[in-house]
Amino acid sequence: MMWPDCRLLDLLKIKLPIVQAPMAGASGSAMAIATSNAGGLGSLPCAMLNIEAMYSEIGIIRQQTNKPVNVNFFVHQEPSQDLKKQKSWMASLSKYYSEFELNEIEQKTSNGRAPFSNDTCEFIEDTKPEVVSFHFGLPKKELMDRVKAIGCIVMSSATTVDEARWLEARGCDVIIAQGYEAGGHRAMFLSNDINTQIGSMALIPQISDAVTVPVIAAGGIADGRGVAAAFSLGASGVQVGTPYLLTKEALVNDLHRKALKNSKSDDTALTNIFTGRPARGIMNRVMAEIGPISSKTPDFPLSGTALTPLKIAAEEKGLSDFSSLWSGQAASLAYETSSADFTKDLARDALKRMGSLV
């Protein structure tokens, strides 16, 4: 059986309509290589990499695959320094610092997540990846024009129909429809109102009807049933994240893997505690006790600075009480395997299920 919509395959020049989600801090070159070589689109998250690391990772990728690859960036606004809010946030965590006998730290104005800039645009111009994707909108027009001039396919995530229309109007070639079920950061950028966020079943067909470019479904997709449903709803492909976190190429630690393997459908929640923006993760102690949503967090991505010492201290004791255990709502469907095998299994299962519906 053939895929019912081949627009994404033809545009990206890939064999399988499966995009491995770029998961900053949790995936790298190894996962991207394995996925691309298996026929999908491997992704390299660059939001937490410096320029030297970006060049190193893309160099490794080019040595081990000649298949298309996606390079991903955040396009958030640099945070303003609000000392009053930072002190209030530290005060919220002071009892935990006392518990672990830690000295309170001075809040920084950066937390290792830099937005797309002239320097990263020069990296794109130099390395010329086939696909460039963005999270939290699109970069400034002059930077966007430079990326498009290279010939890169540009993708970005939309969490509402308005965001999808906004992205298409500004030159986005592919829209990733991110449903409420998705793990990690919500891509929302036109509004901060979490009530605007809807599930994949409602979002995908509405975005597919609203734009003319191919749509990739994301959020809650972990097996062939999800892929088949996405195509039925009008998507041309899927982006999958959480199941890849249990592959051997994932960079997550044993505590995160254990949490994923033990996760149930109702174990996740949206929280802003770890970075200052809403993101879905598995519930843990700090989310339960001061969140999951707190009005005291500094602007993205600064809130994580104060949590880092607590995370390190707790993990040394075998605890994930202060760790960001990113996960979507379908983690219980994931299993341990390799990225290549998962990509092929997902495609095979999807085609089988779509064939049975004909």
Image (cartoon, helix red, strand yellow):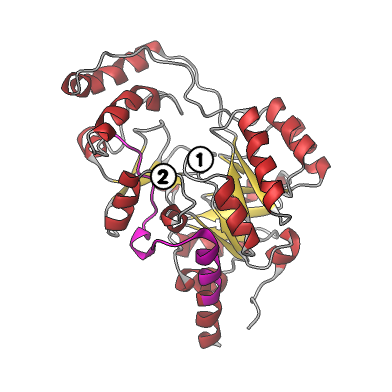
Q: Quadrant of residue 55?
A: top right
Residue 103 position within the rendered picture, expressed as x and y whole percent measured from the top left: 26, 13
Query: Could you tell me which quadrant the C terminus lies in?
Result: bottom right
Q: In this rendering, is residue 19 above or below 70?
A: below
Q: Is residue 162 visible?
A: no
Task: Kindly check if marks 1 and 2 are in contact, taking CB atoms under 8 A apart as contact.
Answer: no
Residue 228 position within the rendered picture, expressed as x and y whole percent measured from the top left: 52, 74
Q: Please indicate whether residue 329 sits to the left or right of residue 319 in the image.
A: right
Mark 1–mark 2 Cα distance, whole angstroms, equals: 10 Å
User: Which residue is painted at 65% across and 49% down in the image?
Assistant: 70
Query: Could you tell me which quadrant the N terminus lies in?
Result: bottom right
Q: Give me the disc on residue 157.
A: none
Check disc 1: other Cα within 10 Å, few if <14, some if 14-19, many if 20+: some
Check disc 2: other Cα within 10 Å, few if <14, some if 14-19, many if 20+: some
Residue 66 position within the rendered picture, expressed as x and y whole percent measured from the top left: 74, 55
Q: Which residues are magenta?
A: 322-348
User: Depth check: 167 or 9 in front?
Assistant: 9
User: Which residue is painted at 34% across and 22% down in the image?
Assistant: 306
Residue 317 falls inside the magenta stretch: no
Q: Please indicate whether residue 294 sits to the left or right of residue 61 in the image.
A: left
Q: In this rendering, is residue 356 above or below 128?
A: below
Q: Which residue is mark 1?
A: 24
Residue 331 falls inside the magenta stretch: yes
Q: Which residue is mark 2?
A: 252
Q: Give SS at disc 2.
A: loop
Amino acid type at circle 1 is: Ala
Q: Give SS at disc 1.
A: loop
